[in-house]
Amino acid sequence: MPYRRRSRRSARIAKQAIELAVAAPQVMTHRLARLALAGSSPSVRDRSEFDRMGMEKIAAFYESWHAMCLALFRANLNLALSPVQFWWSSGRGQRTALAIFGAGLAPVHRRVTANARRLRHTRIV
């Protein structure tokens, strides 16, 4: 059973990473095209999108950082409370690393895929 759970977690993280790798270039392409077409005097709609772009990056970074710190804190707490167990030999280290990576990837994945869906239906001009 633990093996199946671990493979599901690995599969979920891999799926999120692939979706992120596909969605991020789509969002960048849309926004860079919009930036290029806006020129030196962007419209209110363009300025709103550019402001949103900056704020989302900062918010995603802090959400990701917080989630990873919380996952690391939980891992350290588990390690401190179970000194008898062999941490790395039982596969716990890999599961912990996957949990930390997954926690950090989730906020970025959520924002980028939401942006890709939203911008897919938005005209550039």
Image (cartoon, grey):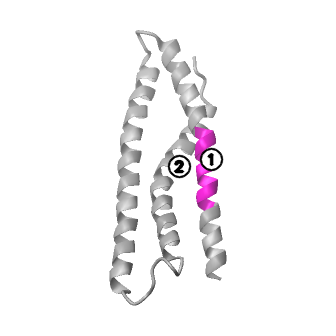
Observer-nearest residue: 74 or 45?
A: 74
Residue 29, x across and y down, in percent: 58, 26
Observer-nearest residue: 3 or 108?
A: 3
Per the image, label 1 sits on a secondary structure element best described as helix
Name the quadrant containing residue 69. Answer: bottom left
Q: Is residue 12 left or right of residue 68?
A: right
Total numbered labels placed on residues in the image: 2
Point out which mark residue 109 bears: 2
Q: Are marks 2 and 1 in contact (CB under 8 Å)?
A: yes
Residue span colored magenta: 12-23
Q: Earlier in the sequence, mark 2 or mark 1?
A: 1
Q: Quadrant of the C terminus?
A: top right
Q: Residues within 10 Å of mark 2 (few under 14, many from 20)?
A: many
Measured Cα–Cα span from mark 2 to mark 1:
8 Å
Magenta stretch containing residue 17, yes or no? yes
Name the quadrant containing residue 22. Answer: top right
Amino acid at dot 1: Glu
Residue 21, x across and y down, in percent: 60, 42
Q: Is residue 26 above or below residue 87?
A: above
Residue pictured at 39% horizontal, 60% vertical: 67
Amino acid at dot 2: His
Residue 110, x across and y down, in percent: 52, 50
**What kind of secondary structure does the magenta stretch mostly adopt?**
helix
Name the quadrant containing residue 28. Answer: top right
Q: Is residue 112 above or below residue 81?
A: above
Q: Quadrant of the N terminus?
A: bottom right
Point out which mark residue 19 bears: 1
Residue pictured at 41% horizontal, 33% vertical: 52
Observer-nearest residue: 72 or 50?
A: 72
